[in-house]
């Protein structure tokens, strides 16, 4: 490969898909993706995201590696004075076979790696970045082996602590929470079918996502000290806690994987691209796992990056700067809308104020009773633009 025209930093799913997208528009690309431990989590991807992955050649038949999400069931378990009704959203109402699919991140990454290997203008280097700086012909990236690479376009998909974001001077707003998320895989006595079930408790939701057969992926959000104590109590006590939290609706529960906990925070940027640099995935946005928006939003970043680069002429001076500014304009509305929606949902659930509780309960009553509002909610939640 000749001197690259683009450098993509980040080895996760968003970084991998960004590298493939950039190479597919014809740019000679270097992907800096240091090897990390397997990502044992799962991702619930909404139908527009699944369709993008299929059109981009990143996956084939979703049923080969995923499980359909046909219903979303919300149960208010807060015990508050003002409580929301139990609400069921069914994909049939939206005229869809499913809202989306739940995928193993390991299986998604395998498919992405296969697509990457077919691109002759995409070279992968399994090294980390030690420094970045602006030079006359683009961005110079220093690697752990002491070598450096220069390219006009730099794509940062290197997570919440993004070195690309910091070095390129992007302004980020971060906010941490006292809540954390605990995740693991379970086997249930009674299967979920295609329904993702959310029990809304005062400090966050306890969500079971179907993973095929009687398996389910758990995402439990609560105060970090509560989750730490639950972990420390041991597998048998944790199993009993899960049975209680699920209100015994699914019978006995067996832990299939160890439970892992991670802290929750939000991150947003004023702009997603400038001066030949674009941010994608958690380098540009991060928020609690509410409404399955995280990777969906990151893959919409990649779709808009592909659109912004479509038709660029690398022989024209300033092409990378123009593309980064175009990308920023394309992402502005979606990032603002989705970030605001998730933040509002999360804070309304945690709020102990009666007016906030009443508004949340009233909103769910309205969704329950109004087909038109449910249709609008489907569009927003699925990221339909």
Image (cartoon, rainbow, N blue to C red):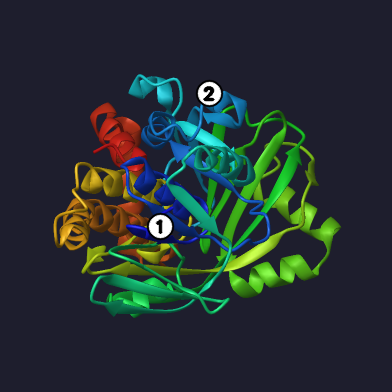
Furthest-front residue in this view = 2
**From the image, which quarter does the C terminus lie in?**
top left
Quarter of the view holding residue 383: top left
Quarter of the view holding residue 329: bottom left
Residue at 18 percent across and 53 percent down: it is 315
Circle 1: element type? helix
- Count residues near mark 1 (Cα–Cα under 10 Å), then give few for <14, some for 14-19, many for 20+: many
Quarter of the view holding residue 345: bottom left
Residue 280, given in percent of the width and then of the height, sits at 36, 58
Q: Is residue 231 left or right of residue 227?
A: right
Residue at 64 percent across and 62 percent down: it is 36
Q: Is residue 206 left or right of residue 45?
A: right
For the question of whether residue 357 can be seen, the reply is: no
> Reading the chain from its start, which is encountered first: label 1 or label 2?
2
Which residue does the numbered mark 2 point to in the structure image? 61
The span from disc 1 to disc 2 (Cα, nearest Å) is 24 Å
Q: Is residue 63 left or right of residue 6?
A: right
Circle 2: element type? loop
Q: Work out whether 106 lies above or below 344.
A: above
Residue 70, given in percent of the width and then of the height, sits at 49, 27
Q: Work out whether 215 lies above or below 121.
A: above
Nearer the observer, 191 or 379: 379
CB contact under 8 Å: marks 1 and 2 = no
Q: Is residue 17 left or right of residue 269?
A: right
Which residue does the numbered mark 1 point to in the structure image? 281
Residue 164, given in percent of the width and then of the height, sits at 38, 72
């Amino acid at each position: 490969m000749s001197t690259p025209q683009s450098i993509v930093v980040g080895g996760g799913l968003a970084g991998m898909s960004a590298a493939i997208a950039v190479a597919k528009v014809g740019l000679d690309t270097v992907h800096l993706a240091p090897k990390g431990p397997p990502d044992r989590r799962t991702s619930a991807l909404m139908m527009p995201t699944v369709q993008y992955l299929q059109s981009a050649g990143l996956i084939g038949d979703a049923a080969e590696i995923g499980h359909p999400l046909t219903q979303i069931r919300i149960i208010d378990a807060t015990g508050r004075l003002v409580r929301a009704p139990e609400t069921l959203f069914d994909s049939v109402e939206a005229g869809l076979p499913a809202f989306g699919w739940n995928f193993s991140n390991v299986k998604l990454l395998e498919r992405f790696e296969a697509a990457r290997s077919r691109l002759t203008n995409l070279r992968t280097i399994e090294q980390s970045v030690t420094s970045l700086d602006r030079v006359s012909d683009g961005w110079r990236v220093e690697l752990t082996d002491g070598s450096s690479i220069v390219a006009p376009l730099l794509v940062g998909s290197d997570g919440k602590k993004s070195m690309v974001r910091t070095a390129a001077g992007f302004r980020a707003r971060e906010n941490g929470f006292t809540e954390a998320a605990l995740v693991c895989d379970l086997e249930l006595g009674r299967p979920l079918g295609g329904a993702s079930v959310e029990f809304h408790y005062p400090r966050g939701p306890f969500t079971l996502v179907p993973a095929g057969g009687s398996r389910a992926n758990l995402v439990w959000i609560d105060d970090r000290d509560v989750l730490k104590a639950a972990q420390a109590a041991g597998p048998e006590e944790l199993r009993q806690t899960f049975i209680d939290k699920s209100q015994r609706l699914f019978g006995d529960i067996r832990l299939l994987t160890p439970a892992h906990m991670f802290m929750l925070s939000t991150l947003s940027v004023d702009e997603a691209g400038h001066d030949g640099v674009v941010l994608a995935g958690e380098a540009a946005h991060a928020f609690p796992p509410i409404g399955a928006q995280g990777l969906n939003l990151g893959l919409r970043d990649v779709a808009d990056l592909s659109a912004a680069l479509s038709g660029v002429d690398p022989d024209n001076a300033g092409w990378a700067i123009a593309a980064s500014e175009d990308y920023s304009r394309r992402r502005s509305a979606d990032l603002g809308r989705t970030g605001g929606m998730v933040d509002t949902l999360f804070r309304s659930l945690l709020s102990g104020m009666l007016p906030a509780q009443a508004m949340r309960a009233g909103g769910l009553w309205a969704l329950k009773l109004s087909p038109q509002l449910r249709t609008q909610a489907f569009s927003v939640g699925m990221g339909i633009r």
